[in-house]
Image (tube, rainbow, N blue to C red):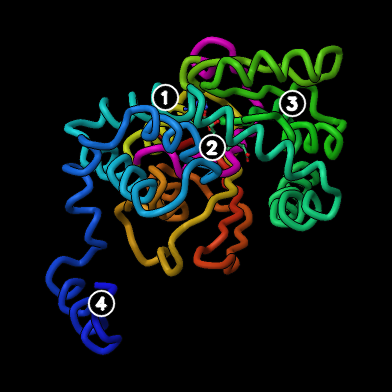
Amino acid sequence: MDGCPGGIRRTLKKVWYALCGDRPYVYIGRFIVRILPQSFQARVRDEFFTARGPTGVFADIVRAEVNRQHYSADSEEEVRRHTRELFWGSTPGKRWHDLGKERFRDVDAYHTEFLGPRRPLIHHLSDLLATTEGYQTICEIGTGNGMFLHVLSEEFPSIRRFVGMDFNKEQILENQVAYEGSRLKFIQGEVVDWIQSGCVDGTIFVGCETFEFFTQKELEELFRLVRQAVELAAIAIFALNRTGFDGETVSQPRGSTAYSHNYDYLLKLHQYQIFRRHIERAGAYDRVCMLAVAQPGGW
Ligand SMILES: C[S@@+](CC[C@H](N)C(=O)[O-])C[C@H]1O[C@@H](n2cnc3c(N)ncnc32)[C@H](O)[C@@H]1O
């Protein structure tokens, strides 16, 4: 549309969005990616979460197509496989964790972008530990480079065990070396397996920007399993949602393979009590900090 006068271009754009509802390359991307070099697509995919790879319209097309394939996968199993094999368990996940480490070496960025937003969750945890005895373990689900688990271990010296779980083998091996000799233990694998084999009563599960990458079904399965398998349990959540999502009950894609979830609703559905909640606007998103406890005597 470069040759169109501004008014005509705007009108055409409006008509397109009214009829189709999404950007044009979401529709034509599947055809265009077939003729783009595999090496170019791989570079975009490897930097899928960091957006540090190639830029421009063809990179946007590849990204839109990756999202389309993910969200329209044939089955729940297929979505879970994508999350593990194509994204978080491989190069795109490792690049994301490396970027975080690099960016937060800067003290200002660390305080304003990393620690500051997570502070309300630390306060919630502090309130819980001050009012309830018996919590001995903190398990961070999707620990990535382990930075937040390390913060928690310094904030809460009374906790005996700190366990960081993640799919990304390379990252977990790196964490094991970086935190050798500390109280932090890192395990590569599925949190549901750990709950069934290595988990103990009195565990607080923490997910920082992790539950967005669970499907609704997966998240509900986790909530149910924690309730059933762990005697004294709490779930702490730090997550971004599409703004105004708290009125919804069905989780929805929110881009970059993530989902908005109504945590409040889903936790109550699985008989958790919301202990503390803090929601604030963060750019185009709502930042949710929530701490819930499994109600004794539930199913
Ligand atoms: C966006 S990253 C967040 C990393 C880190 N918590 C942070 O705040 O930077 C999400 C992480 O969750 C991990 N993850 C997602 N589902 C998981 C599960 N069921 N068990 C273990 N790790 C999981 C992924 O491997 C990924 O590293």
Q: Amino acid at mark 2?
A: Pro
Q: Amino acid at mark 1?
A: Arg
Could you tell whether 20 is left or right of 114 in the image?
left
The disc, 3 or 4, on the residue closer to the chain's N-terminal end is 4
Q: Which residue is mark 4?
A: 3
| Residue at image coords 54%, 21% | 168
Q: Residues within 10 Å of mark 4 (few under 14, many from 20)?
A: few
* Residue 55 drawn at (x, y percent): 46, 49
Q: Nearer the viewer, mark 3 or mark 4?
A: 4
The residue tagged with tag 3: helix, strand or loop? Answer: loop
Contact (CB < 8 A) between labels 2 and 4? no
Quarter of the picture containing the N terminus is bottom left
Q: Amino acid at mark 3?
A: Gln
The answer to whether the residue bearing label 1 lies less than 8 angstroms from the nearest atom of ligand 1 is yes
Could you tell whether 251 is left or right of 186 in the image?
left
The Cα atoms of the two marked residues, 3 and 4, are separated by 66 Å
Q: Residues within 10 Å of mark 2 (few under 14, many from 20)?
A: few
The answer to whether the residue bearing label 4 lies less than 8 angstroms from the nearest atom of ligand 1 is no
The Cα atoms of the two marked residues, 4 and 1, are separated by 44 Å
Q: Which residues are magenta?
A: 194-215
Q: Is residue 288 magenta?
A: no
Could you tell whether 243 is left or right of 163 in the image?
left
Q: Which residue is mark 1?
A: 84
Image position of 103 with respect to 142: above or below: below
The disc, 4 or 1, on the residue closer to the chain's N-terminal end is 4
Q: Which residue is mark 3?
A: 136
| Residue at image coords 25%, 77% | 3
Q: Nearer the viewer, mark 4 or mark 1?
A: 4
* Residue 220 drawn at (x, y percent): 38, 38
